[in-house]
Amino acid sequence: MRYFEYLEPKDLNEVCQFLSQNEQAKVLAGGASLVVLQRNNLIQPSHLVNLKTIPGLDQIEWDDRQGLRIGPLNRHRDILYSPVIQKHCPVLAEAASKIATPPIRSMGTIGGNVCHGEPAADFPPALIALGAKLKLVSADGERIVPIEAFFVDYYETVLAPNEVLTEIAIPPLPPRSSGIYLKLDKITNSVAIAGAAAVVSLDEAGTCTYAGVGLGGVASTPLKIEKTKEILMGKKVKETDLEQVAKEAQTICNPMTNIYASADYRREMAYVLTKRALQEALKKAYTL
Amino acid sequence: MEKREIELNVNGNTYSIAVPPQRTLLEVLREDLGLTGTKEGCSEGECGVCTVLLDGLPVRSCILFAVDVRGRKVTTIEGLAEREKLHPIQKAFIEQGAIQCGFCTPGMILSTKSLLDSNPSPSEEEIRVAISGNLCRCTGYQKIIKAIRTASRT
């Protein structure tokens, strides 16, 4: 591994100033993705800036008006075992439970998982279905980016070299909401062949008041099925509506063939998983 | 190459060493501290033979930098037995025949310890999840799972 300098800054300002002046520097959270890239010499940062020494980046806060705010340094196991997440956003805990293995869940962070830009990553589909927004901070200021606009290509996001993800914000859902994350993998918890997360809300009469679907592993980035709301909201959802969303999933996806699965199979799975995720989320929501 | 003076807490002992930032915890344990119970396998965090406990939780020492674990408690396989008195998990692994070549064993036992410390009566499913990050090429896992179940009863 190439030599790098190592810093332990005391606050976010210090990080932002440093990143603005050192283009080849990278931030270090859990290291579960970053260090593997370094080991394989795919990246050779000049400096690693350890974010874990900075307070305030690992909060999990719920507010009835603003919803959930999650700090990027929360490890997968923090998300999995958080009572706040289990109460308000259990689909995130479900996604966390399907990431890799216990040691990786003790090291990897949700911020790292999102910023790494792996198209088959497990948090993005759930975050997309939830309508998450990302706060990106740099020495030049801050901006809010909806999660579906964050991903550009394989391992490429809109995060600038001098920016840091400081918060993942999830707006509050209506009552009677339920979500599910379905992950298709050959070996339990390995990289997803395809994944779909669905979040739906129903009112007292059984009419859909919210719907969101996110897909993973079926394109060069995680995907949002934009037409979900227009197809499902305001209706008493029928199976044909779900099939319409599932067909839309097939239309927007652009999967690749690799050793784990063919593009055709992934395209078929985009349909199957979308429909199934919506069915199961609705089934749960009806019982609430 | 600039070295950092750091203090590591391993198995209850404090070690002062000077390391460059990219030296991994695994390299420090094996090469600087002579604690060769922790093994190197894939060097990518996938196989589990490098597993140690950090503040009681299993982590991959091959993708952790030593400078990143200053001031935190590291437990390696060497930290389990008290002199000649083996830890109940070690005893269970031996008695149940859960060790063949032994290469995965230190990581397996530490993952087991982390499980049983927080969940003294795990279900079969919970045992399987706990060791899902430790690959074994020899045993087929059945006796390992049996050993963990046995250890959980002691």
Image: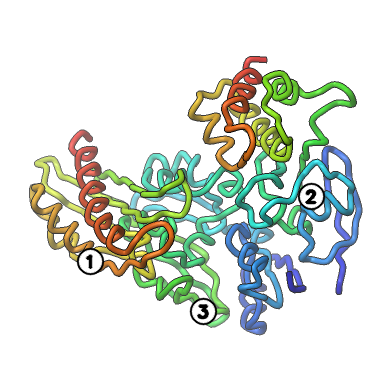
Element at label 1: loop
Residue A286 lies, in percent from the top left, at 18, 37
Q: Quadrant of residue B25?
A: bottom right
In whole angstroms, how far apart are the C-alphas of marks 1 and 2?
A: 47 Å
Residue B55 position within the rendered picture, expressed as x and y whole percent measured from the top left: 71, 41
What is the number of the mark on residue A226?
1
Local crowd at mark 1 within 10 Å, few (<14), some, or many (≥20)? some
Determine which residue is flagged by label 2: B71
User: In the image, is residue A151 above or below residue A200?
Assistant: below
- Alpha carbon separation for disc pair 2 and 3: 32 Å
Task: Give the mark, 1 or 3, whose residue is nearer the N terminus.
Answer: 3
> Disc 1 sits on a residue from what chain?
A
Q: Amino acid at mark 1?
A: Glu
Q: Quadrant of the C terminus of chain B?
A: top right
| SS for dot 2 | loop
Residue under disc 1 on the same chain as residue under disc 2: no
Tell me the subunit letter for badge 3: A
Query: Is A200 placed left or right of A15 in the picture?
Result: left
Give whichever of B89, B141 is nearer the camera: B141
Mark 2 residue crowding within 10 angstroms, few (<14) / some (14–19) / many (20+): few
Is B7 positioned to the left or the right of B146 in the image? right
Amino acid at the residue labelled 3: Ala
Is A189 situated above or below B94? below
Give the labeled residue for mark 3: A160
The disc labelled 2 sits on which kind of residue? Answer: Gly
The answer for which chain carries disc 2 is: B
- Asked if both marks, 1 and 3, belong to the same chain, the answer given is yes
> Where residue A186 is drawn, which disc sits there?
none
Q: Residue at x 61, y 42 (%)?
A: B135
- Work out whether residue B18 can be spotted: yes
Q: Nearer the viewer, mark 1 or mark 2?
A: 1
